[in-house]
Amino acid sequence: MFQVHTLALLLSFTSIVFAIPRPSSTAGQSIALRRRSTAHRTEEEWALWAKNQREVLITKYGVAKPQRRSSGTNLITNQNADSSFFGSIAIGTPPMPFNVILDTGSADLWIADSSCSSGCSDTSTTFDRAASTSFTNSSTQFSIQYGSGQASGTLGQDVVQMAGFAIPNQIFGLCDKVSSGLLQNPVSGLLGLGFSTISQSGATPFWQTLAASNAWDSPVMAFHLTRFVDDPQARSEEAGGSFTMGFLDQTLYTGVIEFTNIPSGQESYWILPMKSITVQGNTIDLPNNSGSYAAIDTGTTLVGGPSNAIAAIYADIPGSVEQSGDYSGYYTYPCDAAVNITLSFGGSNWPISNADFKLKQTTGGQCLGALFALNTGSGAPSWIVGDTFLKNVFSVFRFSPPSVGFAQLSDNALAQNDVQGTVPTPTLADSAVTVVATENANRAIDAGSSGAAPFAGMVGIMLTTVIAWILLDIL
């Protein structure tokens, strides 16, 4: 699922990113990201964290699966020194705000339910079905599995809003059982930003409904993530950057955006062929086939790849040592080494900063590296590229044609690293572009719907069409 997949058991240890929606000064609305300071961990806690980072990805990737337009921005929160990034959405009538992990490596939206009987003690906000007049219940069971746990419950349907957009009939999971540690206050759930082909609920993801309905000015989503991992004074929550839908904030990048198309038929995760890796100026050999496929995953903290390639990377860093036990798959290297690593998916070589590569000092002047060996399941991408890389670029996820693009961060974007500014708070837009999901998006809820609520009836009438209008601002 997501590294927040690490989300489970280790949100106190993990590195994931979440976003909070808030109007911006650019076109449309913005979602700000917040970040939380790094908790002091014992050696045992670091070992558990490292083990779960690996196991979470093994489980997550074990199985591969006409109207007015607008744009919006959600400000992100950086949680626990780059452990995670979250934003905010609103659900129901009246709308209730929730902080959610933003995860391009999964495709389901789920929220902790007010009836949650386990794993929700650290969650400050849960969904109260009775408090929303537009909520439609379902008897359909929902479960999503992560390497360090799972969340389960039933499916529901309600108005979901984010960054100035709304879908009145969005299907989402209401979880009453969540593995311990999967949620850490103030996070209440997860918003999947992958394609519907990997949706556990069978519902079309929020973002995909908007993009397919031409609700956006431009068919793109983009991330700018801040860095605080190298700041020992970082607070538990810091401004984490931004997540935009429908436009690109040109103040956050410079030069051209280099797009690479997703291989035909691979629209599931955001998959790109990795063309090359360089370490200390040396090129690592990569296969010229699906063995080089990489999932670009905002819900993952680190970078995982095939054991032979990871071994070759550290072989070019003098003094590197392969680890074992809970640290199996990881390597340490001399802390005073200047490590120069670049990844390429097209023409440019994109560097990973030393600050992001160095996770922590162990013993004897050795530091733990952020790239580790990972053996994914059959049919899953060989590489999982998470925030260790994504903090170094402006990343764009384009719906049509399906592709991912990277650009160099602007001075304005870089200036937001390690700056203890105002942490964004969830806000509701004064107006929202509203899109009704299609029949395919509602199939899962219809199959298990327990009642003929007026709202459900209205949705049924509109199943075969896509309609957009401006909420509270209809001309």
Image: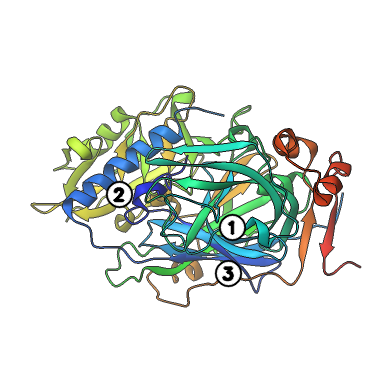
User: At 76% from the left edge and 68% from the top edge, which residue is drawn?
Assistant: 431
Name the outermost residue toward the left: 364
Name the amino acid, label 2: Asn
* Cα distance between the residues tagged 2 and 3: 38 Å
Q: Is residue 21 visible?
A: yes
Circle 3 — which element?
loop
Tell me which label, 1 or 3, sits earlier in the chain. Answer: 1
- Residue 185 is left or right of residue 138, and the answer is left
Tell me which label, 2 or 3, sits earlier in the chain. Answer: 2
Relative vertical location of residue 259 with respect to residue 113 in this rendering, above or below: above
Of tags 2 and 1, which is closer to the observer?
1
Could you say which quadrant of the image residue 330 lies in?
top left
User: At 54% from the left edge and 47% from the top edge, which residue is drawn?
Assistant: 175
Name the amino acid, label 1: Phe
Q: Position of residue 90 (x, y in %)?
A: 64, 61
User: At 10% from the left edge and 52% from the top edge, which residue is drawn?
Assistant: 363
Q: Which residue is mark 2?
A: 340
* Cα distance between the residues tagged 1 and 3: 16 Å
User: At 31% from the left edge and 31% from the top edge, which residue is drawn?
Assistant: 309
Could you say which quadrant of the image residue 129 lies in?
bottom right
Of tags 1 and 3, which is closer to the observer?
1
Q: Which residue is mark 1?
A: 127
